[in-house]
């Protein structure tokens, strides 16, 4: 950006991001890896295990109800990974 000869305002316009967001990231006010919203309850790996479990149950003709999925999610991480 500025190091490459592009102003912060021009960089924000070029890449389609709000100028204040760009300034916050450059000044260190917010982390470059920060995402908006709440933190996730499940890791990506845990979520994928639940997705695979849902697909497996649907494949064998037993689609899960929401409360059944909640029960499966509350089980210990070791039993969730043993699908």
Image (cartoon, rainbow, N blue to C red):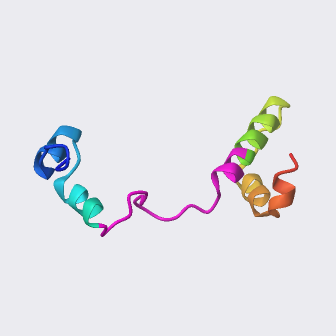
Q: Position of residue 2 (x, y in %)?
A: 16, 50
Q: What stretch is highlighted in magenta?
A: 28-48
Q: Left or right: where does residue 78 sit relative to residue 65?
A: right
Image spot of residue 6 (x, y percent): 14, 44
| In the rendered image, the vertical position of residue 28 relative to residue 15, given as above or below | below
In the image, residue 77 lies in the stretch drawn in magenta = no
82 or 33: which is nearer to us? 33
What secondary structure is the magenta-colored segment mainly? loop
Is 37 situated left or right of 78 in this image? left
Closest to the observer, 66 or 30? 30
60 left or right, relative to 48: right
Q: Which residue is drawn at 43% across and 62% down?
A: 37
Residue at image position (80%, 29%) is 59
Q: Magenta segment: does it hold 42?
A: yes
> How many discs appear?
0
Q: Which residue lies furthest to the bottom in this view?
A: 29
Q: Residue at x 77, y 39 (%)?
A: 63
Residue 68 at x, y = what percent? 77, 53
Quadrant assignment, res 75:
bottom right
């Amino acid at each position: 950006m500025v190091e490459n000869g592009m102003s912060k305002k021009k960089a924000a316009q070029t890449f389609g991001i709000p100028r204040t967001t760009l300034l916050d990231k450059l000044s260190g006010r917010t982390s470059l890896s920060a995402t908006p919203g709440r933190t996730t309850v499940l890791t990506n790996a845990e979520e994928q295990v639940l997705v695979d479990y849902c697909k497996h149950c649907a494949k064998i003709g037993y689609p899960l109800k929401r409360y059944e999925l909640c029960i499966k999610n509350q089980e210990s991480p070791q039993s969730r990974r043993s699908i």
